[in-house]
Structures are given as structure tokens and as C-alpha cells.
Image (cartoon, grey):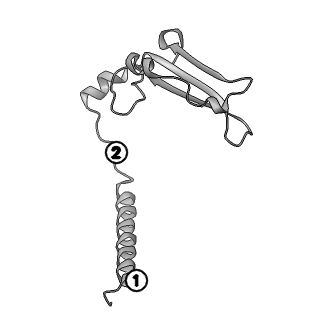
Amino acid sequence: MADTKKGREKQARDAETRQQERDVAESRERADEPEPPRSEEDVEGADDDVPTCHRRGCEEPAAFVVLERYQEDTGYGAVEAEAYLCREHTEEESPVNLEGAYDEYVFRVEPLSSRSV
């Protein structure tokens, strides 16, 4: 194949297609395999029903749940956004979607101890 832009694009597409086909074949082969055994850390933490903080990179246990209900951008319904946050990240939280506020708008922070997870 000639070394042209069109040729390079076709080669790239063909390589992607081959990789996808290999991935699918590998997944099908592994479908019968049992789940890997859980580590001791996973088993110890499995009894804890406390979720971790929703913020990326934070592994602290969540202490609060933040709920915001606002009007969808299209105006055809409400959207509820709920996040479990640690104490530090809850302090940083504030209403985000005030432009979508309406009569039933809600921004609420509740401690997890007063709510069943």
C-alpha cells in the first residue's frame, strides 16, 4: 500500500479492528473462568457499608450525602444529583446548578449517621 494519508488511516483502522477482534475473542475465552479470589483487604472492608468519598483520588470514608435537585437543561424534568463525601470535601461543597432552580429545587447536606445507606 502506498505511503499516503489515506493508506496510513486505513492501516490504523485495520489495526484497531484487529485489536478489537482479539479483545472480543479473549473475553469469550475467559467467560467460563471463575472470579479471582478476593484479597484479605477486600474481605475486611466488605462488612463496612460506609461508602468512600465520591471525589476522585479521595479514599476517606463518606460522612455526608449531598443532594441537589434542579430543573433539567431542557426544562422537561427534574434531575437529582447525589454524592457521598468525606467531611473535608463536604465543607467545599456548594450549590452548582442554581440556573436550574425552580419551586422544588433542593440543596441538602445530610450526615450519613441519620440516613440509611
Instruction: Give coordinates of residue 112: x percent, y percent.
Output: 48, 14
Q: Residue furthest top?
A: 114
Q: Is residue 3 left or right of residue 94?
A: left
Q: Residue at x 40, y 16 (%)?
A: 87
Other-residue count near label 2 (Cα within 10 Å), few / some / many at <14 / 14–19 / ≥20: few
The label on residue 14 is none
The residue closer to the viewer here, 72 or 60, is 72
Among the two numbered marks 1 and 2 on one chain, the one whose residue lies closer to the N terminus = 1
Other-residue count near label 1 (Cα within 10 Å), few / some / many at <14 / 14–19 / ≥20: few
Q: Residue at x 37, y 69 (%)?
A: 16
> Which residue lies under the disc numbered 1?
6
Kind of element beneath mark 2: loop
Which callout, 1 or 2, points to the residue nearer the camera?
Answer: 1
Q: Residue at x 74, y 39 (%)?
A: 76
Q: Is residue 29 above or below residue 79?
A: below
Quadrant housing residue 11: bottom left
The residue closer to the viewer here, 42 or 37, is 42
Instruction: Give coordinates of residue 29: x percent, y percent.
Output: 35, 59
Could you tell me how many numbered marks the image carries?
A: 2
Instruction: Give coordinates of residue 84: x percent, y percent.
Output: 47, 23
Alpha carbon of mark 1 to alpha carbon of mark 2: how far?
Answer: 44 Å
What type is the residue that disc 1 sits on? Lys
Quadrant housing residue 40: top left
Q: Residue at x 40, y 30 (%)?
A: 55
Kind of element beneath mark 1: helix
Quadrant housing residue 95: top right
Q: Are marks 1 and 2 in contact (CB under 8 Å)?
A: no
What type is the residue that disc 2 sits on? Pro
Instruction: Give coordinates of residue 50: x percent, y percent.
Output: 41, 19
> Which residue lies under the disc numbered 2?
34
